Amino acid sequence: MLWKKSPSAVLATLLTLHLLAHIDRNMLLGFSPQIIKDLALNNAQYGFLVGAVWVLSFGVMAMVMGTLADRFSRTRIIAAGILIWSVCTWASGHAQSFEQMAVARFFVASGEAALVPAAVSLLAELFSEKRRGTAMGLFFMGIPLGIGCSFLLAGTLGASHGWRDTFYILGAVGVAIAVPLAWLKEDRRQVTSQERGAPAMQQIRAVLQLIKGHRALRFTIVGFVLIHVAFASLSFMQLWLVNERGMEANDIATRIGALQLLFGTLGAVAGGVLSDRVGHRFRGGRASFIALLVIVCAPLVIAFRLAPAGSALFYVGMCVAFFLPLAIYGPANAAIASMTPQNMRSTISGFTMLCINVFALAIGTVVVGAATDYLIANGVTVPLTRILLTTDALTLSSALFFALATRVSCKQPAIDMPSLQTTK
């Protein structure tokens, strides 16, 4: 397995794959007007395609793919995932109805669910504890970059070739990447039981037992899930800015996209690097660093909701709101990996993704919409401002759980199992 001797090259490859995954994932958003028109979709159908169908598949399959990645070749699990999501991205371009698009997107999500659990496990193995947060942060930089590139491609390649040809091209690129990746050898049958997971149901039971008995790990996962409530509120940000803050739709959409791309990327990098550089100086390590970061950012996040629209404080708060969630990815994933035995890391990552998708994204988005409708029906002024302030409070309450993880971590020290190859 000579490829494991170049951790930086592995990280660069995984970042590229994560970027491609989020381009494919968000292309439906970039082409939403054209796809809605061509397939004659109503708003409910479109919402199902970008929301429920993704959560139903991605959330559940992340856990399943995680158990497989802990037991079998992670490179081949990733390659199989890329092949599935790329073929189904290509198939999305052929869709002629809502039903056909729903089936294609369901399997795009299923394929993409293979990447993160396997990648997190690989990075935790290849990078030492001192560099793990940086590696995780750089990998998750694929999220803001992928979102930005998807809209960029929709406005350039899509403008000249249309949405169907763009989906065809992306599908072909993914297949071309998946085939050589499948030839990277990683024989997990020859490693020890400490390095290889158990059969699926046994593995899931073991992981749930670990979470039940490891309070610091449990608090860290809860805090990480709460951070993602910010993404539920993001779905309503443009509506809030236009309806309640009086901003112009096209202008603010461009600014949101540019600022999210810039500060989301900056957050992913800075959060990972800083957690490696200064996290060890805090009692409780990365959990303390995350709690402090959330507390420092909290006043500006709240100020964003209350400051006059267009003011300097308003835009500073908006940038911090984009920066904070991505800044948590590197240190949170590194902290979770360090508290998890090597043979469970992919499954733990899949479990965390399942919780994020179900509780923060799916339920969170539905509750925000329903609560807003309730306030409107009862004549409440600026209903979205009130609801989004509540989601901000839930997001920021994650600091409490990271602080609790810090408090108990001395009694339950991190589990950092020896790896096959680590950088020095």
Image: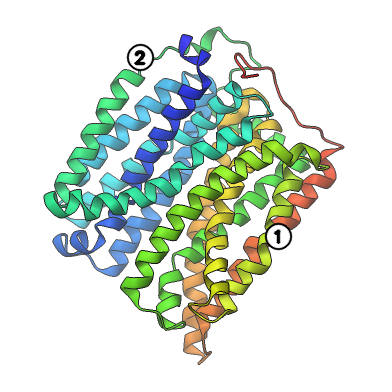
In terms of depth relative to the viewer, which is nearer, 395 or 212?
395
In terms of depth relative to the viewer, which is nearer, 199 or 161?
161
Name which quarter of the figure residue 202 lies in: top right
Please indicate, yes or no, whether residue 194 appears anywhere in the rendered image.
yes
Judged left or right of residue 275, residue 368 is left
Q: What amino acid is found at the position of numbered circle 2 in the picture? A: Trp
Relative to 182, residue 354 above or below: below
Callout 1: SS: helix
Relative to 211, residue 144 above or below: below
Q: Which residue is mark 1?
A: 296
Name which quarter of the figure residue 330 lies in: top right
Q: What amino acid is found at the position of numbered circle 1 in the picture? A: Val
Local crowd at mark 2 within 10 Å, few (<14), some, or many (≥20)?
few
Q: Residue at x 70, y 46 (%)?
A: 220
Q: Residue at x 50, y 41 (%)?
A: 140
Relative to 184, residue 215 above or below: below
Judged left or right of residue 340, residue 135 is left
* Quadrant containing the C terminus in the rendered view: top right
Q: Residue at x 59, y 68 (%)?
A: 391
Please indicate, yes or no, whether residue 1 appears anywhere in the rendered image.
no
Q: Picture coordinates of residue 290 (x, y %)?
A: 70, 49
Q: Which residue is mark 2?
A: 183
Q: Picture coordinates of residue 83 (x, y %)?
A: 30, 30
